[in-house]
Amino acid sequence: MKTLGLIWRIIVGIKDLLVLALLAIFFIAVSAALSGATPAAIPNGAALVVSLDGAIVDQGSETSPLDTVSGNVTSEVQLRDLVRGIDRAAGDSRIKALVLDLDLFFGGGQANVVAVSDAIARFRKSGKPVHAWATAYSDDSWLLAAGASRIWLNPLGGVIFAGPGGSRLYFARALEKLQIDVNVFRVGTYKSFVEPYTRASASPEAKAADQALADSLWNSWLADVKRLRPAADVPSYITQLPQRIGQAGGDGARAALDAKLVDQLASRDEFDAAMVKLVGEGELKYWGHYSGVSLTDYLGATAGKDKTSGDAVGVVYVSGSIVDGEAPRGTAGSTTIRQALEQALDENAGIKALVVRVDSGGGSVTASEEIRAALLAAKADGLPVVASFGPVAASGGYWVGTAADEIFAQPSTITGSIGVFAILPSFPRALNELGINSDGVKTTPYSGEPDVVAGLSPEVRTVLQMGVEDTYRRFITIVAEARKLPPAEVDSIAQGRVWAGTEAKRLKLVDNLGGLDAAIAAAARRAGIKGDVRVINIEKPEPAWVKALKSFGGSETEQQARDPWARLLLASRQRLLSSMADFAFLASGQGATMQAACLECAAAGSPRPAAARASTDNLAKLAAAVQSSR
């Protein structure tokens, strides 16, 4: 029987090896074909069609070969690609209009949405129209559409604004019922990430800080709306929504039109016909019959316009949770980022300055320090370093940013959260309830520690708490030296508290309000670079065959519901699943014990569809395991 089992394992191994070999040959063939592919033609007088399926992100997440081939890919659009494409089309005589298809768009973080809105404003200044269409609009999608020349809405749709905020889950009572001990070591009055595992509700301090942040973000959103579409009285619309829909006979789309939130009601076919009148008829594409070119094809066809020589500013991307070692795109692996930076500086003598672009709520303390140290090493070699904070640059993300000579943030950037914690679960009571006991011998008080079976020893608890407090003192010192502030003043605005960009500037945690373009321009000035600035992105590259196969396959947005309430439900689900993925990562023991993380920032920062998808997969596996155990 053992012999048969061995033979079977050998056969399975040979089969797996053959599959991998065939996949490798396939991908090599695809890459070779792509290298010689002819760029798509751009019709004269066409529209640049920007179909925002999924989320706007700073850095696209990595996709496995199997998921890529099957079309099971996370729907994301990189901010830099959007802005570059729209800006380039503004000066392209072949492009007559910009069309924003927002039907499957579910957010991008307010700071990133504003950056795209600014690009749309520059496009309109060229004298070309911008048209936006969707079945339904919510906060991010309507803010993006607000800068358009004309906003179109499906007659069966509507516009619903939620604003920042919402419920969080608290597990303390459930953990007590399960007799699971959550050992928390923390510094900072407002370090509220640990509260869901130690309390049944938010502490007064955490709730007050969360409310202040939500109010600041909401005021920033309302200010952007007023600037982009002054005729729309959004506060009144929200306050009177039931009455307005009632006056429209229950028709949400008509209520939005009457409130001047949209300009015209039209089905997709009617919108298609209107665009045919504007730019002419073209080949049938996924967007319709009108003459157009997709953002991906346009960027490919105009790639020759990218500056490839001369002095440059290197942009280092720190996106997603900060973890030790190597990590895929969309996660900030400290070794991956350090090696990418060192390689870029070694291979590109033209890099004269750096911008570190941060869209992260932090993570591992040691990983954050490794990235900061790599930036400081470049700085010691004479390169100016400027930080650009995206939707979130908090805790470990802020730790990284302290390496900069100058920090830029958007008014809606979520930053600060200067605090440290460690969290370790243990299960002595739960195991005892099951009749499982532990026993053993020790040679030191630390043998077998941290002991998640018998519980942490008093000595380990003391050492861990001292370590957290020491790391917090180091964090305060780093910030004080970087921002040229007294440590006591930093401590008073730290304590784990989160701030919006506008408040952070007032508190001197950031220097200027502005986006990535402003940070690149500042870095170029510091380096003495004149004229158009060449930009070199410093990150783990995405293979060409992955980009191509993503465009061939379907995506997870294609079967999503599109009515207004479904869009809000999707956004809420994404936030919840992303938070669960963060907790699962920490509870699994894969992450660092010492954390400078603001994981609660996930609720108000950039959407993270990859993390949400991973959490969904884990929940499905858990449900299957529970079902099979019955």
Image: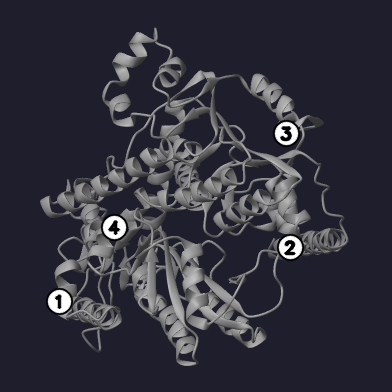
Residue at 75%, 49% in the rendered image: 297
Pointer 4 residue: 502
Percent x, y of residue 60: 57, 57
The residue type indicated by label 4 comes to Thr
Pointer 1 with pointer 2, Cβ within 8 A: no
Pointer 4 with pointer 1, Cβ within 8 A: no
Q: Earlier in the sequence, mark 3 or mark 2?
A: 3
251 vs 616: above or below = above
Of circles 4 and 1, which is in front? Answer: 4
The residue type indicated by label 2 comes to Lys
The residue type indicated by label 3 comes to Tyr
Pointer 2 residue: 305
Q: Earlier in the sequence, mark 1 or mark 3?
A: 3
Of circles 1 and 2, which is in front? Answer: 2
Mark 3 lies on a secondary structure that is: loop
Pointer 1 residue: 458
Residue 541 appears left or right of 397: right
